[in-house]
Amino acid sequence: MDVFGLLGNPVGHSLSPPMHDAAYEELGLEARYVTFEPEPSEIEDAIDGAEALGIAGLNVTIPFKQDVLDCVEADDLATRIGAVNTIDFTGEGAPTGHNTDAVGALRALRDHGVTVDGARAVVVGAGGAGRAVAFGLADAGATVEIANRTASKARDLADEVPGATGHGLEADALADLLADADVLVNATSVGMEEDETPVPADALHGDLAVLDAVYRPLETRLLRDAAAVGATTVDGAWMLLYQGVEAFERWTGREAPVDAMNAALRDRL
Ligand code: ATR
């Protein structure tokens, strides 16, 4: 029996257990995915304990994604992003840390026919999600513009991301950036609590692919506005799905049953 799981606090409403359990069932794997809520002061002990117990893999979520960096051998992308969301215990040496949020966003876009290499991309948000998406897109060959309410944070992040430029979130600045953009990603929490959008509807156009990292609700105001002008829309569940798919494939070395995982996820949204 292989044991996988999620470290976070709180983790009660996580969609990862049903998503991963659906994959084990579909492939007939003897595995379980369980959730753990350690105290922040115990995170290092939690990882040492997981290793000692033979746990095969852990996902990591709020508030531990940054803390875990120092407890594992983080790969280059996770180190640059400054956050680990997947720990792999299956190798010979120390546990390794990875960030599958970045690849999750890329696979969500590619799954919808979007070419990222050579694309002009606008990332709204410069928090944890914004960092992951900005590095992921830049690594995949996109030119990245980062727009954030706190413009200084966008500029600081842009200094770290190859070829990126940072901006504020003013309507005219956004309209200019989006006029010749191919991809727009909302990596803020705007749209989650209320029916609001970080991007004015009239800045959107039909040649855009719009990914919203928000998945509750699935159809955000941004995605409604984008669909209304004929843009390609990619909801946040796709990003959530593919970060899980990527973790599953790293841990098991098997191709993930994407349809079964997607169905389990969407059943609960
Ligand atoms: P996460 O890890 O989900 O990215 P975070 O690190 O707290 O969360 O980042 C939240 C992001 O959403 C930030 O980019 C934040 O902008 P600021 O850096 O200016 O705070 C953005 N955000 C949150 N609420 C916002 C709002 N009402 N309007 C615009 N941006 C908002």
Image (spheres, rainbow, N blue to C red):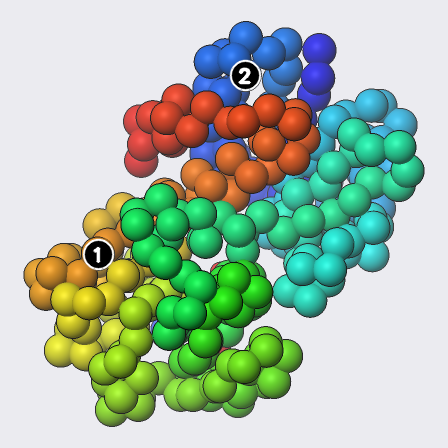
Query: How busy is the neighbourhood of tag 2: few (under 14 within 10 Å), some, or many (20 plus)?
Result: many
Ligand 1 in which quarter:
bottom left
Taking the spot 36% from the left edge, 58% from the top edge, the residue there is 115
Q: Are marks 1 and 2 in contact (CB under 8 Å)?
A: no
197 shown above or below 25: below
Q: Secondary structure at mark 1?
A: strand
233 shown above or below 60: below
* Residue 37 appears anywhere in the view: no
Which kind of residue does numbered mark 2 sit on? Tyr
Of the two numbered discs 1 and 2 in the rendering, the one whose residue sits closer to the viewer: 1
Circle 2 residue: 24
Quarter of the figure that contains the N terminus: top right
In the image, 58 versus 118, the foreground residue is: 118
Taking the spot 60% from the left edge, 32% from the top edge, the residue there is 249
Q: Position of residue 128 (x, y in %)?
A: 56, 64
In the image, 154 versus 8, the foreground residue is: 154
Q: In the displayed orientation, state which residue is furthest to the front.
A: 118
66 shown above or below 94: below
The total of numbered circles placed on residues is 2
In the image, 248 versus 53, the foreground residue is: 248
Lower position in the chain sequence, tag 1 or tag 2: 2
Which kind of residue does numbered mark 1 sit on? Thr
Quarter of the figure that contains the C terminus: top left
Q: Position of residue 260 (x, y in %)?
A: 39, 22
| Disc 1 residue lies near ligand 1 with CB under 8 A | no
Q: Position of residue 145 (x, y in %)?
A: 43, 80
Is residue 88 found left or right of 211 in the rendered image? Answer: right
Q: Which mark is residue 13?
A: none
Q: Which mark is residue 232?
A: 1
The answer for how far apart the CA atoms under marks 1 and 2 are is 32 Å
* Residue 115 appears anywhere in the view: yes
Q: Position of residue 69 (x, y in %)?
A: 77, 56
